[in-house]
Amino acid sequence: MKRLLTLIIAFVLCTLASYSQMFSPFTSNEGYDLAKTSAETYLGDNPKLLIIGHFLGSLDLTYGGVPVEMPSGFDFSTGKANYWVYVFKNETSKVEIGVINSPMLGGFQAMEMDLSPYLDFTTMIDMQSEISPNEIIDSKDIDQYFSQNSEFMAKYSNLESYKDGYMGLYYNGPVPEFEQKLYWGFWFIKENNDAEICALDIESKQMECIAYTSVEEENEVDFSISPNPANDILNISNTEFATNYVISNYVGEIVSEGDLNSGTNTLNISNLPSGIYFIQLSNNSGMIKAEKIIVK
């Protein structure tokens, strides 16, 4: 029965993809409850929300073996789009749920999605903490903040010059070059996978745009971070390309940071309570490596 429903949805989506007016755009909050209910069928009760996102271009997906082109339909002035993607997790797994609103299908519909060809959310299982319901701000509020920033609007109005564009409205966790714990962000991806990122701190309402160089293009340096698990000392070797480090706890709070010298660096972590932490190594071009560490 589930397979039949998937094929029916795929068939209808193929039709709708050719007639984007058949979608009924909606804001991110309007699809949240259905997405959470759907995620619970995969993850159990009360899954944690990692991110609500949207691809600014058409999304090429496969439903029931049928290729589907999902038109974005995003309207910057209203914050409404033809679909939203919600990523949830439990302690060991994650699921990506897509929600659409189609009168032809009887209204709102939710389905599991595989977004790995676009973005890999797997690392978020460890690196992200839960976004609580009172932290969620609806996409309809985007315009009043982003439209006031001329640097962002210049990038957004020139979206066709980029390979991809992605909007992450609720992202809770460490991101290269940004100190905010919870923010809205827009990624503008270039052909060489470099990116320009504009992010808004939800609490301070301050906005910043930066350039981010892809790690693969810059180098493929094999750093060594040991021992892991660690007690009092953490060694970081082969740091010719990294100039600083940041260690954050499970909820994204920075507990240690500093500069790195070339060669091997020894960090004293004896003051850190036992638990799970995340270390980021960076240079002037952005983050080079992020890794989970365990302190005994």
Image (cartoon, grey):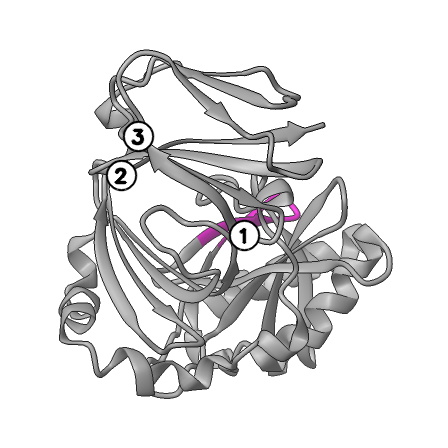
Residue range highlighted in magenta: 60-68
Q: Are marks 1 and 2 in contact (CB under 8 Å)?
A: no
Residue where numbered disc 3 is placed: 215
What residue is disc 2 on? Answer: 193
Image vertical order of residue 67 relative to residue 53, above or below: above
Upstream in sequence: badge 1 or badge 2: 2
What residue is rendered at 52% in x and 80% in y? 137
> Residue 270, relative to residue 75: is it above or below?
above
On screen, residue 11 versus residue 191, left or right, reads right
Vertical side of 75 occupied by 45: above or below = above
Name the kind of residue labelled 1 in the image: Gly
Report the residue marked by disc 1: 252
Name which residue lies at 80% across and 51% down.
Answer: 42
Looking at the rendered image, the quarter that the C terminus falls into is top right
Q: Residue at x 44, y 66 (%)?
A: 183
At 23% across and 61% down in the image, what residue appears? 209
> In the visual, does 83 lie left or right of 241?
right
Left or right, residue 197 beside residue 279: left
